[in-house]
Amino acid sequence: MTNKINFIDLKAQYAALKQSIDTRIQRVLDHGQYIMGPEVRELEEKLEAYTGAKHCITVASGTEALLISLMALGIKPGDEVITTPFTFVATAEVIVLLGATPVFVDIQPDTCNIDPALIEAAITPRTKAIMPVSLYGQVADMDEINAIAARHGNIPVIEDAAQSFGAAYKGRRSCNVSTIGCTSFFPSKPLGCYGDGGAIFTNDDVLARAMREIRVHGQERRYFHTRIGVGGRMDTLQCAVVLAKLERFDWEIERRVELGKVYADLIKDAQIPVELLSTREDRSCVWAQYTVFTEQRDAFQEHLQSCGIPTAVHYPVTLNRQPAYQQVCVPGSTPLSEAAAKKVISLPMSPDLSADDQRRIVLVMAEFKF
Ligand SMILES: *Cc1c(COP(=O)(O)O)cnc(C)c1O
């Protein structure tokens, strides 16, 4: 009898950190400051130190982080925001919620990140932000994107780093490689809490202040509202959980990078005809998802499922083809994104994935008749 393989193993992580997490949670229950308690600022300070960004503003979720960022930049109806159609829906959702238009630019087929070479042609006088996504845990080509943005009148660049917290990029950290970085603490992300949470990072004092105010209903001081805001705070309890998880986060990031290398080696050694994601020399990939490509994706997924290996597809439909988005975006031509959506499949990945389980997964993959 073999053990059950989880797509993401949060139970093993809790078992390893139980004492710290329980102590941290109990401390919040004892002081009772559930909203904006001391753990909120404590976490923000730790994450500022970790990323090197001057400001960290914790918020209610990764989606809220993106929304508050766009609000702080003053994004309004008629504006355009350049992004990728090959991402989680939240990236485009927040643009549309503000009445602005997502302009979708295609990806590099080997990394699935937005292709900087295609961005310039999509810029118009209405372009008010560029929002690359660091998909699967690998930072997008931020230097190239920042340079294009600078050439066109300093268009702000927002990194959607929901999947890449902890990833390195040319000696810097994801979330501190552009005007604004946004991450998510959704439980399955590289740094997760036990509910919803997120954070915004910036080195810009003016933007940071605007974001802090927007997070709490646009108030400059209590009941004095100078902007339109949202109820976007992160709970003290969730901050306490993330603080406890930071204790072994460096180890987890090392494990993720290592597991990615082992997957690649095992798959190559077994000569399994799936394509691997390319990782660039000058950055690390923290593998929020370990995603590979195969033309026979659906049958391959069924085979793995029948052998007890859970998988997922990130993402089966590009955003410009989603029913709700067809009317509200500039659909553009993004054939590489659409091709990727048909081929991608994500394998089990978490820092606690054992070497035995990883070998078993690859053995089952090798049994598939390609
Ligand atoms: C998870 C995710 C989000 C949204 O984060 P939530 O915390 O779930 O709101 C946004 N963008 C990307 C790329 C994500 O993976």
Image: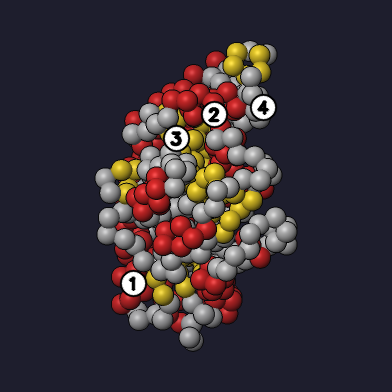
Question: Dot 1 corresponds to which residue?
Answer: 266
User: Label 3 amino acid?
Assistant: Phe
Q: Earlier in the sequence, mark 4 or mark 1?
A: 4
- Measured as percent of width and height from the top left, residue 7 is found at 52, 59
Q: Which residue is drawn at 64% across and 51% down?
A: 101
Badge number at residue 211: 2
Question: Dot 3 corresponds to which residue?
Answer: 201
**Residue nearer the viewer, 355 or 79:** 79
| Mark 1 crowdedness (10 Å alpha carbons): few <14, some 14-19, many ≥20 | some
Q: Which of marks 1 and 2 is nearer the N terminus?
A: 2
User: Label 4 amino acid?
Assistant: Ile
Q: Which of marks 4 and 3 is in front?
A: 4
The residues tagged by marks 4 and 3 sit, at their Cα atoms, a distance apart of 20 Å
- Measured as percent of width and height from the top left, residue 295 is found at 52, 80
Question: Dot 4 corresponds to which residue?
Answer: 228
Q: Residue at x 33, y 72 (%)?
A: 266
Mark 2 falls on what kind of element? helix
The residues tagged by marks 1 and 2 sit, at their Cα atoms, a distance apart of 45 Å
The residues tagged by marks 2 and 3 sit, at their Cα atoms, a distance apart of 10 Å
Q: Which of marks 4 and 3 is nearer the N terminus?
A: 3
